[in-house]
Each structure stands twice: as structure tokens, then as C-alpha cells.
Amino acid sequence: MTKWRRPYRDPVLILSGILPVVGCVYVVLFAAMTIASWPDVSVPYTVAMGVGFAVALTLTWRLHRTALVIGDEGVRLRWLLLTRTVAWPDIREFQTRPDRLGLDIRRDRMFLVRHDGTSVRTPIVRNNPVPRYHFGARWIRPDRYDLLLTDLNRRLREPEFTP
């Protein structure tokens, strides 16, 4: 079994990790209130709230787990609703290209380029020195971004290298 890890420091990880914890606290409070007033609470309301909480907690957990992670098998790209794994032998290089975020904002994003020429968008975006979290992207300072890009491309050329 491969141990997946982030090859970069993510300053927003703690903030995005608080959301599922706060959501769990709300679920426990809702459950306690429902149990305390059970005869007066309708079952459809309770089921609807339970489903709503389950969906919200799942989305906040997936948002927290959004990342580019590496392991012995390859690179795993975790997005909000999709996780994709690309094996190391299938990757030609990592490169930076402009990507459109939102309305008219363009930022440099890291792309994974396969040997067949197809590009795969990663959640890693080069940012100014202030860390941000936007649309599931992980914003990394330019100096750390460039170091990550260099390390990942070095990992492709030297199989024994572990960033």
C-alpha cells in the first residue's frame, strides 16, 4: 500500500481542516436537540437534516483533502469530486501555464504532461506571498512553487530521488 504525501507545505490546511470539525459539532448538537425533543420532531425533517449534514460534511472533508500528493506509484490529484492517479512512467514533465480562475483572473497553474501529449490540470497555483484558497486550488508562494516544480521534474529524471 502506497503512502501518499504532499511534497509541499500547505499553510491553508489547518483552516480547511476546521470546517469538518465545526460541522461535526453541529451534527452532534442537532442530534442532541432532536433526541431531547423527539416526540415533537417529524421524521422527514430529521431525515432531510441528516442527509444535508452528510452532504455538507462530505464536501468539506473533500475540500480539505484537495491536493497534489505523491507516492511510489505516481502522482495523485485530489479534487473536490474527483481523484485521479497518474503513474510515474506515464508522466513526461510538469510545467507551468496560465490558467483562468473565475471571471477574469489569470494565474500560473501547474500542469502534468503525459507522454501522449495530454495535459492534466493540478490543484497547485502560483500565488503572491499571501496564501489563499480558491475553487479548490492550493495557492503556493512563488519561491516554493518553483522549488516544487523543480523537485517534481527532478523526480521524473532520477527515479531514486524522493522530494
Image: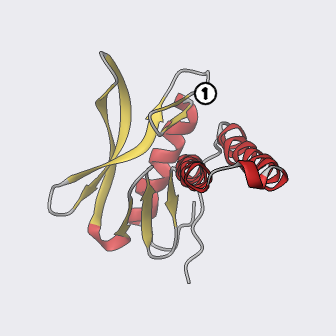
Instruction: Specify whether 151 is left or right of 27.
Output: left
Q: Residue at x 56, y 47 (%)?
A: 56
Q: Position of residue 36 (x, y in %)?
A: 85, 52
Residue wearing tag 1: 131
Q: Position of residue 125 (x, y in %)?
A: 44, 35
Q: Residue at x 50, y 26 (%)?
A: 127
For residue 96, above or below residue 58? above
Q: Position of residue 103 (x, y in %)?
A: 31, 18
Q: Position of residue 44 (x, y in %)?
A: 55, 53
Q: Residue at x 51, y 63 (%)?
A: 70
Q: Nearer the viewer, residue 102 or 122?
A: 102
Q: Residues within 10 Å of mark 1 (few under 14, many from 20)?
A: some
Which corner quadrant holds the C terminus?
Answer: bottom right
Give the number of marks. Answer: 1
Residue 9 image-quadrant placement: top right
- Farthest residue toward the left? 116
Kindly identify the amino acid type of the residue bearing the numbered disc 1.
Answer: Pro
